[in-house]
Image (spheres, rainbow, N blue to C red):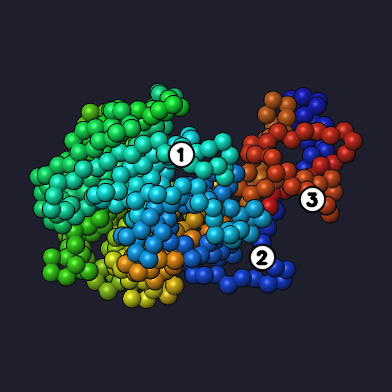
Amino acid sequence: MKNLPRFALSRLATIFALTVLAHQLFCPGTARANPFAIRGPGVRAADFRITVFATNLYFPLGMVQLADGSLLVAVSQGASFWNSTGQIIRLTDTNHDGVADGPGAILYSGLPGGQTSLRMSGNLLFVTGQGAGRPISILRAGAAPDSPLTFVGAIKVNYPSGGWEHPHSALNLRPTPGRAGSCDLFFQMGSDQNFAKTTRTTTISSAQIAGASGTLEGESIYMLTLTDNVTNVVASNLTRIAKGLRNPAGFTFQPRTLDLYFEDNGIDGLTDPNEPFSVDELNMIPANQIGNGSVPDFGFPTNYTAYRTGTVVGGGGIQPLVTFQPLPDPFTGSESEGPNDLTFAPPGFPDALNSCIFIGFHGKFSQGGIPNEENPLVYVDLNTMSYFQFIGNDEPNIGHLDGLLSTADSLFLADLTSTGDTFSGGNAGVIYQIKSLVTRLVFQMRDNALELSWPSGVLQQAYSLAGPWADLPAATSPYLAVFDPTHPQTFYRTRN
């Protein structure tokens, strides 16, 4: 301390930072009932606020958060997921109570139905459905969060006749290394069959996106670079980055390293489709191996881990990080089947839950509630490669937690349809918000100023510990506290 400049010492004496844990309720003195239970080692229900963020949605799945905190959601308007019209709606929560202000405003309509993924890079949104007739559409955001979206172009995936068992359905994006204004789009082309080598190919083409062309092999993950020139978007560098995968239907990037983590769906039962032949998996490709000329092989169809017994068949290919067997006993335990989406945990979650991966499992194809005993939300600890069901598969009101969005302090979950029925379950989609109530405010001296940092919540200021406390809504972390000589003491805290 004796080496600090005199001004910094004065500031330390007059500015005091403290951390406050704030629990918000629906109304004074009344706590709301949680829509489902959370559980697992190190999990404390009191650390979270769980709310039904939006209801009566038509098959919500892809979600992104805009800079103002509102959500864009891909929905499929219709009684059937498979016979519907795709839309992008915007949901707001202006009073931050965990409940959307209304049914949402439509920012774009006219997409094919059966929308399965929505991602955003810069001003561009990428949205796709599953399979033939559902291209990867590119939309442009407007000047304001509530501005209508405009159509830029569509990348068609052209399939051969006769069907394709595991077509494209998942997207993710990363900034293109070393190329400002460009992003890399990742998508899958799964296997043609349940349990056989894929020999056919597909192609991509576009009437609006120059360079979006090429041939795709099955059992693969592909990367395509998109460059936004404002007046148009061009594509380049179609690259196969992985092979030997049955259906890698979800991707996420480690926020710091940009390593690519993805799931792979196991082989369906050869006699009973609901009794898997092989396990679902979690896999990873290090960032420095993405698109470097090598194409890592994950072994499908001749290499896999048998369901329940754990027998490794073949032993070739890159072995998974995690295999998902029933818990705690593979023969009698609770099942987790059909991973659809995954995300790294919100950094504002409690320490035991803020560094690894959440995975949503679809479970049985068109069932929900208790009959769907395969649809939990799982947390994977990448330090131990162990996992547990954060939300169990025994929740009576949950169908398919197929869409996940991680923000600074919240995990949003999109239940495709709470009835579980994708053929007639329209208007039964739900979005939940799991918000951390653990706030942390830390401070340090930086360039003779007091710098405050916090992972989530709103910074507040007062000139007395007793208050009144005032929000500083424009303050973002890190924040340089300004010394006000008219007030001998200034206090800071965060609230949710």
Q: Residue at x 49, y 60 (%)?
A: 431
Dot 3, crowdedness within 10 Å: few (<14), some or many (≥20)?
Answer: some
Look at the image and tell me whether residue 172 can be seen.
no
Looking at the rendered image, the disc whose residue lies closer to the viewer, 1 or 3, is 1
Q: Quadrant of the N terminus?
A: top right
In the rendered image, residue 299, in percent from the top left (x then y), is placed at 16, 47
In the rendered image, residue 122, in percent from the top left (x then y), is placed at 48, 34
Q: Nearer the viewer, residue 467 or 40?
A: 467
Q: Residue at x 54, y 55 (%)?
A: 104
Dot 2, crowdedness within 10 Å: few (<14), some or many (≥20)?
Answer: few
Query: Circles 2 and 3: CB distance less than 8 Å?
Result: no
Q: On the image, which quarter does residue 208 sit in?
A: top left
- Vertical relation: 434 (above or below) 383: below
Look at the image and tell me whether residue 209 can be seen.
yes
Residue receiving disc 2: 25
- Vertical relation: 292 (above or below) 489: above
Residue receiving disc 1: 150
**Type of amino acid at the residue the image marks with label 3:** Trp
**Type of amino acid at the residue the image marks with label 1:** Thr
12 relative position to 126: left or right: right
Q: Nearer the viewer, residue 366 or 321?
A: 366
Residue receiving disc 3: 469
In the rendered image, residue 234, in percent from the top left (x then y), is placed at 35, 28
